[in-house]
Image (cartoon, rainbow, N blue to C red):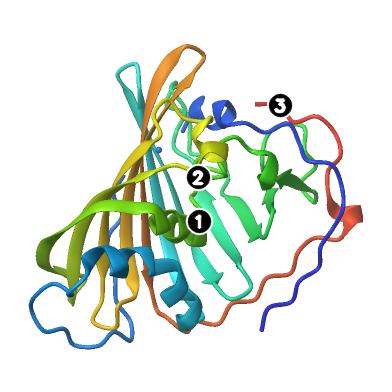
Amino acid sequence: MVVQRHGAGRAGAIVTAALVGGVFAAASGCGGGTAEMTGGPTPDPAALVRAAADRLVAAGSSQATTSMEMATGGTRVTIRGEGTYDYRHRTGQLTVMLPKDVKGAEERRPITELLAPGALYMKNRGAGVPADKWVRVDTTALADGNLVTGGATDPYAAAELLRGATGVTYVGEESLAGVKVRHYRGSVVLPAKVAKGFSTAVVPFDAYFDGSGRLCKVRQQFSYVNRDRPVAVASTTLLYGFGAAVGVRLPEARDIFDGKIQP
């Protein structure tokens, strides 16, 4: 059961640049409750890919692992996350691990992220935020649609982006964590509202579906400019353990930080 408590509070001044300062890679594994697959592509590959989000809603929920690899100026860093997601309520919880900083310091404390329609709540996010407080971000106001800002792509957002899939081709049948999957490749032209946050509106993707037609892995490649420097982002989302229990309790207004966030 999902328990939702929508807290108020102003969004903190969080932007992608804050994560690029130390943050982005392939994750592995897909499985859990999938049907046996017979060889060969579906009659309409594009239709299968475009319906990915709808099929996840039908599945109800899953476990999720995310990986975001960012490369800029010869530096490559990776952020990883793991948790659960409820596709019917569009709520989820991820524990996000940040990498060591450029000076080789120890990895920073994990960030807890709560995902909800129109909002992202983060705990342990940035200096100056009390340990018992959450930062609330209005995701509807983010130029990138929260595809990379939070350091972990929202699993439903990643699937919903595939609604605009074009040039879809069937690559072949593969094994993903012991599960037979069909591999498809194509690209998406970002919606105008989201595209302004990136340097190119075309997003290449690789998507993998199990025998029940459920998306269990998607890798999407973004590109944007931060402080006049190009940044290449490869976001990989793994979905498995369909039907997993998900419990998300959103913070009360009194638990949300209302001050300035330091990078």
Q: Which residue is mark 3?
A: 262
In percent of the image, x 38 and y 57: which residue is there?
162
Mark 1 in CB contact with mark 2 (< 8 angstroms): yes
Where does label 1 land, which residue? 157
- The image shows residue 45 at horizontal and vertical percentages of 22, 66
Residue placed most toward the observer, 249 or 231: 231
Residue 92's quadrant in the figure? bottom right
Q: CA distance from mark 3 to mark 2?
A: 22 Å
Whole-percent x and y of residue 260? Answer: 80, 29
Of the pair 57 and 178, the residue shown nearer to us: 57
User: Which badge, 3 or 1, comes first in the chain's sequence?
Assistant: 1
10 Å crowding of disc 1: few (<14), some (14-19), many (20+): some
Residue highlighted by disc 2: 147
Select label 3 or label 1 by which is in front. Answer: 1
**Where residue 76 sits in the image (x, y, percent)?**
33, 29
Circle 1: residue type: Ala
